[in-house]
Image: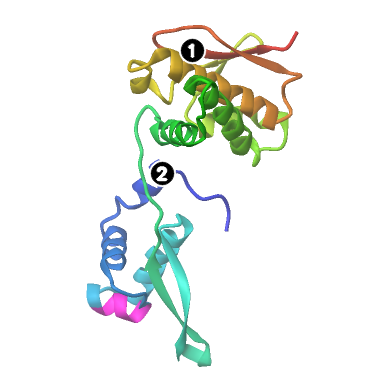
């Protein structure tokens, strides 16, 4: 199976009524169900059900489990389907408030005086940035990483502008803390991609775009 579709794409797949019916049925079922049980419950043909189940499995919304107690055709274990625990959330433009919350909660857990909370949050954010970059091991994937996190990068000469702030609403609550965390994340991305020799991240306050920019390293 290839890369799992993003939340917007997964939600788009659920816009198909029959597919949504299957997912809703499995999400409310007390146990995993066979394809035959799904077809009987929803009065749906096997071919159509198989098509939609395959799409749901590709999105990570449904998973297949072997039924050790029963067998299907040709004596093979019957397949059962169940809804996964994957959660979907999508917004336009992209927002990543859960990422900010994870960092701040982890910082609260690690905070010990006399170190300030902001210092701990910055350290946690750098570490989290490195972790997020771990799946993108080459510097030329920086744009891919930033795009996947909702920053919507754009080129301005050799500088990378982040035209969307994933933490926009929270920036108004505590600008200094949120922007410091965002900058620390950027340092973590560059460090994790071994791209610190190519770019350096700094703050350039902007009311419309993300306040972080990435300039060519001196």
Left of 4 or right of it: where is 36? left
Q: Which residue lies at the image location 27% right of the left edge and 62% below the top edge?
A: 24
Q: Which quadrant holds the N terminus?
A: bottom right
Where residue 162 appears, x then y in whole percent?
51, 18
Give the extent of the magenta segment. Answer: 35-40
Q: Which sits in the foreground, 45 or 65?
A: 65
Q: Which sits in the foreground, 173 or 202?
A: 173
Q: Which sits in the foreground, 3 or 45?
A: 3
Q: What element carries label 2?
A: helix
Left of 164 or right of it: where is 136? right
Q: Which residue lies at the image location 40% right of the left edge and 72% below the top edge?
A: 81
Look at mark 2 in the image and give the residue it sits on: 7
- Residue 165 falls within the magenta-colored stretch: no
Q: Which residue lies at the image location 52% right of the left edge and 29% below the top edge?
A: 112
Query: What kind of secondary structure does the magenta stretch mostly adopt?
Result: helix
Where residue 113 appears, x then y in whole percent?
51, 24
* Quarter of the image where one finds residue 126: top right
Look at mark 1 in the image and give the residue it sits on: 211
* Quarter of the image where one finds residue 158: top right
> Looking at the picture, does residue 88 appear above or below residue 164?
below
Where residue 216 appears, x then y in whole percent?
70, 12
Q: Which residue lies at the image location 54% right of the left edge and 26% below the top edge?
A: 120
Q: Which sits in the foreground, 103 or 92?
A: 103
Q: Taking the image as drawn, is residue 87 in sight? A: yes
Q: Which quadrant holds the C terminus?
A: top right
* Mark 2, other Cα within 10 Å: few <14 / some 14–19 / many ≥20: some
* Quarter of the image where one finds residue 168: top left
- Residue 39 falls within the magenta-colored stretch: yes
Left of 216 or right of it: where is 66? left
Observer-side mark, 1 or 2, equals 1
């Amino acid at each position: 199976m290839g890369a799992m579709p993003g939340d917007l794409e997964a939600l788009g797949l659920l816009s198909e009524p029959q597919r949504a019916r299957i997912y809703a049925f499995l999400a409310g079922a007390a146990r995993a169900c066979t394809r035959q049980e799904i077809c009987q419950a929803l009065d749906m043909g096997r071919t159509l059900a198989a098509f939609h189940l395959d799409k749901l499995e590709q999105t990570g919304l449904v998973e297949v489990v072997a039924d050790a107690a029963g067998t299907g055709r040709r004596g093979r274990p019957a397949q059962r389907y169940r809804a996964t625990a994957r959660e979907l959330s999508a917004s336009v433009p992209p927002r990543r408030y859960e990422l900010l919350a994870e960092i701040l909660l982890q910082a609260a857990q690690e905070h010990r005086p006399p170190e300030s909370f902001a210092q701990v949050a910055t350290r946690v954010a750098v570490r989290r940035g490195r972790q997020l970059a771990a799946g993108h091991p080459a510097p030329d994937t920086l744009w891919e990483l930033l795009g996947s996190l909702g920053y919507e990068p754009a080129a301005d000469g050799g500088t990378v502008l982040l035209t969307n702030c994933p933490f926009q609403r929270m920036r108004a609550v505590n600008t200094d803390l949120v922007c410091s965390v965002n900058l620390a994340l950027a340092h973590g991305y560059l460090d994790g991609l071994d791209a610190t020799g190519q770019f350096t991240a700094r703050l350039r306050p902007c009311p419309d775009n993300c306040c972080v920019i990435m300039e060519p390293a001196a």
